Image (cartoon, rainbow, N blue to C red):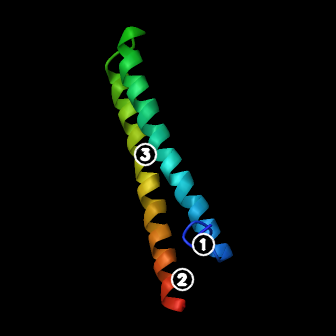
Amino acid sequence: MSAHNSPSKPQDAVLAARGRRVSMVIAGTMVLWFLAISIGPMLGLPGRYAFLFDFAALAGLFWALVVSLQIRRARKSLRDNE
């Protein structure tokens, strides 16, 4: 394995795990949002539920953005301390 594939510090491993979690939340949010807006009309749900699905997706993506920025700041901090 190369040095790029295995984190050398425990903080790097934690940040990598958080990054994987963020990527799964983004992918899951988009899949669930797409399914919700596609299946909703087939189930006869009123159009106002589309806004609920949209806001839920926005909340998930906003969370992912905030955590991504936290990861970026933590990595910059680790780099500056080396």
Is disc 3 surrounded by few (<14), some (14 to 19) or many (20+) residues within 10 Å?
few
- Please say if 1 is above or below 28: below
Residue 46, image x and y in percent?
35, 15
Q: Amino acid at mark 2?
A: Leu
Q: Tell me the quarter of the image containing the N terminus.
A: bottom right
Numbered tag placed on residue 12 in the rendering: 1
Choose top left, top right, bottom left or bottom right for residue 9: bottom right
Q: CA distance from mark 1 to mark 3?
A: 27 Å
Q: CA distance from mark 1 to mark 2?
A: 9 Å
Give the residue pinned by disc 3. Answer: 59
What residue is rendered at 54% in x and 70% in y? 4
Q: Nearer the viewer, residue 35 or 82?
A: 82
- Among numbered discs 3 and 2, the one appearing first in the sequence: 3
What residue is rendered at 50% in x and 46% in y? 25
What residue is rendered at 62% in x and 71% in y? 7
- Please say if 43 is above or below 16: above
Q: Nearer the viewer, residue 20 or 34?
A: 20
Callout 3 secondary element? helix
Q: Amino acid at mark 1?
A: Asp
Q: Residue furthest left?
A: 47
Numbered tag placed on residue 78 in the rendering: 2
Q: CA distance from mark 3 to mark 2?
A: 29 Å
Q: Nearer the viewer, mark 3 or mark 2?
A: 2
Q: Nearer the viewer, residue 62 or 7?
A: 7
Asked whether the beta carbons under mark 1 and mark 2 sit within 8 Å of each other, the answer is yes
Residue 34, image x and y in percent?
38, 28
